[in-house]
Amino acid sequence: MKKTSILLLGACFAFFSCKKESDPEAKLPAKNLISVAGPGIAAAVYWNTGVANTAWSAFNTACYNPGGKLYYGTTLKNSVAAIWTQAIFWDMAMSVYTRRKTAADLTRVNDMYTGNYNQYDGYNWNNTTVWFIYDDIMWWVMSLARANQLTGNATYLTKAISGFDRVWNGSYDPVGGGMYWDFNHTGKNSCINFPTVIAAMRLYAITGNSTYLTKAQNIYNWSKTNLTNTSTGQVYDNKIGSNPPGGLAYTYNAGTAIGAAYALYKQSGNTAYLNDAKRYADYVKNNLCTNSILPAEGDFNEQGVMKAIFADYMMQLINEGKQTQYLSWIETNVDAGWTNRDASRNLTYRNYAIPCPTGYIQTYEACSIVAFLQLAPGVIFYQITLYGGTSSGIIPKGNYTISQLQAMGFVNDWASSAKIPPGWTVTMYKDDNFTGQSWVINSDTPHFPNLSPTANDVVTSVKIQ
């Protein structure tokens, strides 16, 4: 990651400097801190479908290039965002498609692949001018694998595999273990090691090739030992040579550590991995926050995207891992960030506790609240038992007729299983408008045929509370 390049390579300092004299953003006036996380703040005021849609639309109006099909670096729209951050923005688009399941959102996902394909030499991983750091490639490998899982597009999988192989062959240290972040092998950083685990686990889930699982386990074990404090849960930025691990604790490193540990837990059921993920989350919550608000990373540089990465894996731990003890903390951050948005543009800022500047801002620092908003908890219905086949979008609390459900990817007389957030209750009805036979479920339900009477392929309307 770019912050590390500052620490490790003096020659790169000017390129990745936080503030450049020629950058007018560096001249923006400082804001007074406004605390919005006090006892009087109600959680989850703004975390709803309407706000999520508004935030996504505003972010794209301000930052997306529909002609180039990729993101600008700032709201001035006069530069292209950094290569690795485009993968993070692609992940955000995938989260929107997962939530809404609309044809337009799927088109955006595919368009962004094309736009970045055109911008970055067709994902030619051997072009060392375009791809000059291993972690830049690995962020894309993770996203490409996810895109294949989401869409079934085989091209995405082919690119993910070739990218993974390129990084593994050049980055892995077979003697000392771990992955080097750069082509010169100056250090082994969290920004390459934990993403490698996530990418390998996604490729293992797709292909069933146990080599990926072995590599993931190998790198995770090395990373846990060499890049984390196994007592406190701190995730360090880097390890250089035989020196102790060092560098600042960043949310994106904690996020990918959470994602790596959770992926291994999901595959194995070994609660040691889940406990690791919770320990990394606890460290961020208890040590990196001020008044429960996440740190304002990204002083006019690419670090502004860090919390968008953290959002992906923290919300996976909450939503899929059922670790809802963290939900109110994240809700407080979402409410703070949205409260302090620039209301004229509905743009949010990297520092959730102060008003968003009304002048131009970087795409990086505008993205993280948008990312969190797309990942709110909700019910997901599946076409096949055991959560298989096509799935609906993420459906929040509310009452839904068939026409309303269809707008979120649900199909009439189709559902065979459902995943439900802890503490929620779903009442399903055989007929539209909440009539006919009904069933009440309040936890993950993998097999609708086992309900009495069977609810398989007959649900038409639902109430979610």
Image: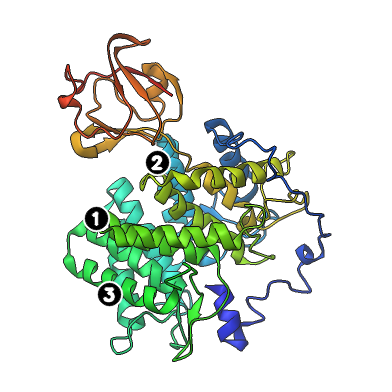
Mark 3 sits on what residue?
218
Q: Amino acid at mark 3?
A: Asn
**Mark closer to the observer (1, 2):** 1
The residue depicted at 36 percent of the width and 11 percent of the height is 434
Q: Amino acid at mark 2?
A: Thr
Q: Are marks 3 and 1 in contact (CB under 8 Å)?
A: no
Mark 1 sits on what residue?
269
Q: Amino acid at mark 1?
A: Gly
Please tell me whether residue 423 is drawn above or below residue 11 in the rendered image: above
Instruction: Check disc 2 and report its element: helix, strand or loop.
Output: helix
Q: Position of residue 220 (x, y in %)?
A: 33, 71
Camera-side residue: 288 or 182? 288
The residue depicted at 35 percent of the width and 76 percent of the height is 167
Q: Position of residue 88 (x, y in %)?
A: 49, 57
The residue depicted at 44 percent of the width and 43 percent of the height is 324
Q: Quadrant of residue 12?
A: bottom right
Spot the residue most to the front.
Answer: 231
Identify the mark nearer the N-term, 3 or 1: 3
- State the mark number for residue 98: 2
